[in-house]
Image (tube, grey):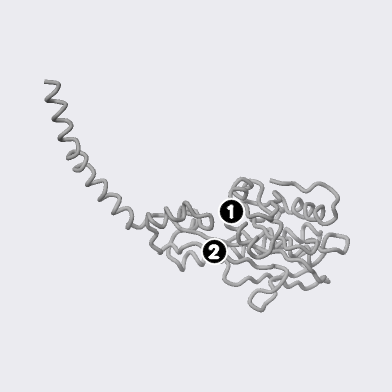
Amino acid sequence: MFSRLTRFSRLTRPRAVAVCALPVVALLATAAFAPLPFSVAQPGMTADVLGENKGEPVITIAGAPTRDTSGELRMTTIEATSPDTRVSLGDVLDGWFATDRAVMPRDAVYPSGGDVQEIERHNEEQMRESQSAATRAALRYLKLGDEKVKVSLELADVGGPSAGLLFSLGIIDKLDGDGSGGDLTGGRVIAGTGTIEADGTVGAVGGVALKTQAARRDGATVFLVPKAECGDARAELPEGLRLIPVTTLKGAVDSLVSLETGRGKVPSC
């Protein structure tokens, strides 16, 4: 009896496996072509907030003397597939193993939901709020009143709040530099990311591993990163790019001054 049972099992197992495999193959085939709730992101453009963007100065200041600068402060971005773009399992697998792309939940990239136009309006509103907070934080740091000093920030085709820290640093560099007449950048190409509150608090943004790649591609040697995202920034850190963690605007300024002058401690991730 055991011999016959064993023989039966051996004869029928391949057929059973084949029959069971058919639904699995069908499921995988469907998943490979079905749209999934993800976006695929890659390093985006960077822009020097101390310079011009599309022929217009990013920072314009009235009501106070400004100074010439020699370095660069580059805000960084990521580019993600639009919410109505079909992302398949193959796209997800490709992005999962690539170092220059990342697969992100669509809700993390587009938290406002809605259609493309609604998302664009949401991102534009976030940018305006970020610019306002960046201006207030910078003038507060410099102990200047916004009733006298007027700051205009213009950056075309970019939405969201993640350029806030760099906007604040750009305003400070144009008005005060390092506080002793020198560039806040020390003539370097400094890049970074981070939201900013009016009180100078720096917040996390997401996508920092891709932003470090964009920064290094465009010549940066130093990257300011929200301290909470140090681990993400280290994950795919390009060679030749130094990370400086920040939690406040004052901390970011102090770190850049220490880096320039060689005095004081420069934190690291």
Name, please, the residue furthest toward the top. 1
What is the three-letter code of the residue carrying label 1?
Answer: Ala
Q: Write down the quadrant of residue 60 in the picture.
A: bottom right
Q: Position of residue 216 (x, y in %)?
A: 65, 60
Where residue 121 appears, as percent x and y from the top left, is 51, 67
Q: CA distance from mark 2 to mark 1?
A: 21 Å
In the picture provided, is 214 more to the left or to the right than 26?
A: right
Image quarter (top left, top right, bottom left or bottom right) of the C terminus: top right
Whether residue 216 appears in this view of the structure is: yes
Q: Nearer the viewer, mark 2 or mark 1?
A: 1
Q: Residue at x 60, y 58 (%)?
A: 211
Given residues 249 and 36, the one toward you in this image is 36
Image quadrant containing the N terminus: top left
Q: Which secondary structure lies at badge 2?
A: helix
Q: What's the mark number on residue 123? A: 2
Q: Residue 139, position in %: x, y? A: 77, 61
Indicate the amino acid at tag 2: Asn
Q: Which mark is residue 209?
A: 1
Residue 187 on image: x %, y %: 79, 64
Q: Secondary structure at mark 1?
A: helix
Asked where in the image residue 162 lies, by quadrant, the reply is bottom right
